[in-house]
Image: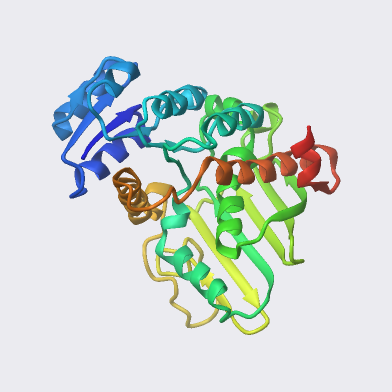
Amino acid sequence: MRIGILGLGRIGAFHAETLSGLGAVESLVVSDPFADAAKAAAERFGAEVADSPEALLAAGVDGVVVAAATDAHPALILACVEAGVPVFCEKPVARTMAEGVEVLKAVEGRDVPVQIGFNRRFDAGFVAARAAVRSGELGKLHTVRSTTLDPAPPPAAYIAASGGIFRDCSVHDFDIIRWVTGREVTEVYAAGGNRGADYIREAGDADTTGAVLTLDDGTLAVVSNSRHNARGHDVRMELHGFADSVAVGLEDKLPLRSVEPGVTFPAGTPHDFFMDRFTAAYRAELAAFTEVVAGTRPSPCTVADALEAGWIAEACTLSLHEHRPVTIEEVRRT
């Protein structure tokens, strides 16, 4: 098949490399507002260059991967849908939830699949954890712990435009909690602090946060996030049930050091970058998209799925600023 890529920054170039290695993909068409980025990708992967999204859609593509800036996501998703071309778009759907809801309204009932990029759904550990929950081998869940800790904060310009740590970082935890447990979040309580980079505080954000989520069956989920984890990029999940407990991310590249006498685990070099931690998941995610394009599977992460994680992020942001519990329905009505 012939796949288009809109946006050739860090993640777009990474997707181009991944797609070029998939057997189902015969050719690529790439486009970026910065001509040099598109040219470099074309030379590296033997891709055709289109000078605009419109030209790319007119180039006979079977599917499109959107890796452009967030502000462009709604228009590019809708342009692909209008052209009848299946589209994969990195999260978020839009800069604001209001815009995201408008995208959902526009694509609902259409025959064109849209897949949103939440790559943890394709990580082998999270897939196994979901299977353990769904099979009943853990019994009823009572506690979930989800962690995302970055080794260093992103630049000030990114922080200023990100919408906050819950919207750009924790949202991955929120999505994977829903996906693994099969439950919805009903209420949140969030807290946060700043003991690191001053520019994060100045942007009105927190660099370290904790949130307690109440799921619709009474299970408690505890989410921990930080921009400062010097040992590496730490992504984990624990699921505790009345019959058994399992963990995702408990492997030799876990960026955590044991101080127990005689313990050598973890013995590997810690993960220091999200692309390192999730290389295989990204590949599986785009392989799944080629199946969506081929019509052999439905979208594994819809616009509606992405918005549900977004509502949890909105509730946590409000809870952090107002120091109180917030229900999902409260933010959904605003």
Confirm whether residue 88 shows in the render.
yes
Percent position (x, y) of residue 326? Answer: 81, 46
> What residue is shown at x 63% (from left), y 41% (from top)?
310
Eyeballing the image, is 177 above or below 105? below
In the foreground, 327 or 78: 78
Percent position (x, y) of residue 186? Answer: 76, 53
In the foreground, 132 or 39: 132
> What residue is shown at x 17% (from left), y 29% (from top)?
47
- Residue 184 falls in image quadrant: bottom right
Can you say which quadrant of the picture contains the C terminus? top right
> What residue is shown at x 31% (from left), y 40% (from top)?
15
Eyeballing the image, is 184 above or below 261? above
Please indicate whether residue 11 sits to the left or right of residue 110 in the image: left
Percent position (x, y) of residue 306? Answer: 56, 43
In the foreground, 298 or 305: 298
* Total marks placed: 0
Percent position (x, y) of residue 2? Answer: 21, 35
Confirm whether residue 273 shows in the render.
no
> What residue is shown at x 57% (from left), y 34% (from top)?
104
Q: By what rule are the colours in the image chosen?
A: rainbow
- Residue 54 falls in image quadrant: top left
Can you say which quadrant of the picture contains the N terminus? top left
In the foreground, 297 or 14: 297
Please indicate whether residue 49 sits to the left or right of residue 319 in the image: left
Please indicate whether residue 165 sits to the left or right of residue 303 in the image: right
